[in-house]
Image (cartoon, grey):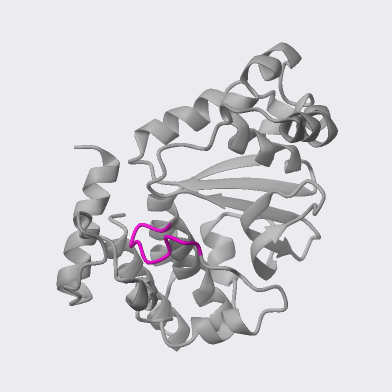
Amino acid sequence: MSFEKRVKDNLSYYKEHILKNSKPGHIKHRYILPKEDGNLNYLLGIRDKIDGYLNQLEVPINLHRGFHHLNSSQAMCLNFFYPFIQENSYTHLTQALKLNGEITSLIFEHVENEKEGTNFDVCLNLKNKQKVFIEIKYTEAKFKSISNISKGHLFKKQTFYMEPLLKGFNEDWLEHNFFKNYQLLRNLPYANQNQLVYLIFSRQHTKMVNEVNNVLNIMNKEMRKYVEIVYWEDLVSNLLNAFTQDDIASKYLHVHFKDFQEKYSL
């Protein structure tokens, strides 16, 4: 059974038996909530608070059209990272991601370069002035490629991507593979000594594991050290191991991330 099929079967069970929601959200797919119940895609520990947080942001976050799908990677991202904003503490997250610098702030849906336009799921600002740009995947089949190459795509390739990518890749390889690996490669120009790029996905998603490793294994060592693969399974395990039982925040976060682990089959 494929990773995607296992996940969707688990989420179908989760919808009916944990959320107690038997209303059909789709004629075929049982893991999809009715649109009016999309709020149930937030885990219980944040469900009554996160909308208020999102609504007060200066730059609003638009929920994706498929947010009511229980396998939404946007919902997964918010379920994972928002509790640290809610608790106003990033100590455990810093430890779980094994960062050298202390996290001072977290931004969802961050665009570092407005002209270029890459939207990172999360940006972490560190006390040492570094930034960590995070791209999250869950059941998506792969990072997106481009088959219908427009003048706009070619312009961005030459204007924004090729120069920084040539610090890590062979030019001939890039010419033949850039658009086949478009979404992944447009993230990597941001990787340097002041900016780290973290790619988070499941170890069980072997197709994506192979796809990403096939690209990163070609990078030279200098650029590669600024790019990290983080598996969801390790990240959640690291967090659960970091929590202590002697403070209220840890107890709340432990319960939340056990729920996260159960929901997302990690």
Magenta residues? 64-72
Location of residue 149 in the rendering, given as x and y in whole percent from the top left corner: 65, 27
Give 169 or 251, whichever is nearer the viewer.
169
Res 148 → quadrant: top right
Q: Position of residue 226 (x, y in %)?
A: 69, 40
Q: In which quarter of the image is the C terminus?
A: bottom left
Q: Which residue is drawn at 59% across and 72% down?
A: 90
Q: In this view, does 10 lie to the left or right of 99?
A: left
Rendered position, 145 above or below 97: above
Residue furthest top in the image: 172
- Residue 21: tell me if it is visible: yes
Relative to residue 4, is residue 218 depicted above or below? above
Q: Position of residue 243 (x, y in %)?
A: 43, 72
Q: Does the magenta stretch include residue 256?
A: no
Give the image location of residue 200, x and y in percent.
50, 48
Q: Image check: 247 left or right of 4?
A: right
Give the left or right position of residue 81, taking residue 160 as reference: left
Quadrant of the image containing the N terminus: top left
Q: Can residue 88 be seen in this view?
A: no
> Please, is residue 170 above or below residue 196 in the view?
above
In this orientation, which residue lies closer to the viewer: 188 or 180?
Answer: 180
Residue shown at the point (46%, 61%) measured from the top left: 65
